[in-house]
Amino acid sequence: MTELTPFSGRILCDFASELGEGPTFDPATGTAWWFNIKGQELHELHLDSGRKTIHPLPFLGSVLAVIDPTRQLIASDQGLFIRDTGSYALSLFTTLEDKPGNRSNDGRVHPSGALWIGTMGRKAEKNAGAIYHVAGSRVTRLYGNITIPNAICFSPDGSAAYFTDSAANRLMRVDIDPATALPTGDAVVLSDESAAPGDIDGAVCDADGLIWNARWGAGAVEVYKPDGRKVARYAVPATQPSCPAFVGAKAERLLVTSAWQDMGDGARAADPDAGKTFELGIKVKGRFEPAFRL
């Protein structure tokens, strides 16, 4: 097993989210965003000043993407919404599926401006979810029978997509059209982690093509080469890290969200930083997220 590097970072935010997820960074404003899905909250943190705001939501939000300086796209259990950054007003953009028992989970914008977004059952019911491709308001179902969609990210040149069903714990790779983000072949197993501790959760792909994955249940962020070889493991001071995001003026730092979901009193006492948001404390060659194209 790849050696685990001890944690050398810091707590960026000590608010303990039940299910911290979907972090992203807007370099135009120097602001990190993430969700407390179960708490129906959108968290906003200005990195330089440390100014923190929690925005209540009328739904279970999980993914945020910038559209332009005045608008954001939010994925939720009720569909995709456009959020006005000045008034905080929300307007429905499009629905994903007619399954009231489902919610959105992991997702990411491709360099083409299209969104890949996953759905799942609210109680992680087996095979209840799917992964969708959203280009403008056109929604295309890519993969069905997904239990917990995660690790959605794209190679720097936009020619490959990565994803997983955390219930199966196999990191998948598929060739895609760089101009549209639609698959051009069959998905193949890049790394089979089904026998390893913890679950493959959220992921980002850096400028060198390395895949940085939060390992839920194992207290680590793990790094894969594009050929699937695991080359590094970094400790996170919470058992359930959920998703990383590149932050900083040059996308040179790594933020990691976490969760205390499904922990009893004893487990939470043994894991006092569960649900907090961290900076990993290492230099990375990150990339800023593309804007979603309406």
Image: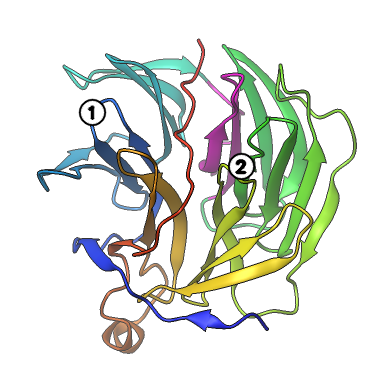
Q: Residue 29 carries which label?
A: 1
x%, y% of residue 288? 44, 34
> For this view, does 194 lie left or right of residue 250?
right
The percent coordinates of residue 22 (x first, y second) are: 43, 45
Q: What residue type is labelled 1?
A: Thr
Q: Around disc 2, counting alpha carbons within 10 Å, would you say few (fewer than 14), some (14 to 19), or many (20 or more)?
A: many
183, 284: nearer the viewer: 284
The residue identified by callout 2 is 153
The residue located at (78%, 23%) in the rendering is: 177
Residue 58 quadrant: top left
Closer to us: mark 2 or mark 1? 1
- The relative height of residue 140 versus residue 19 in the rendered view (above or below) is above
Q: Is residue 109 magenta?
A: yes
Q: Which residue occupies 24% across, 37% down?
A: 31
Front residue of 14/29: it is: 29
**Which quadrant of the structure image shows residue 283?**
bottom left
Please tell me how crowded label 1 is: few (under 14), some (14-19), or many (20+) other residues with Cα within 10 Å. Answer: few
Name above or below for residue 148 compared with residue 72. below
**Magenta stretch contains residue 70:** no
What is the x, y in percent for residue 88? 21, 22
Q: Going 49% across and 26% down the picture, which residue do you hit?
A: 290
Highlighted range, magenta: 95-121
Task: Determine the residue positioned at 76% across, 41% down.
Answer: 144
Give SS at disc 1: loop
Residue 99 spot, x, y in % from top left: 60, 35
* Amino acid carrying mark 2 in the image: Cys
The colour scheme is rainbow
Residue 100 appears in the figure: no
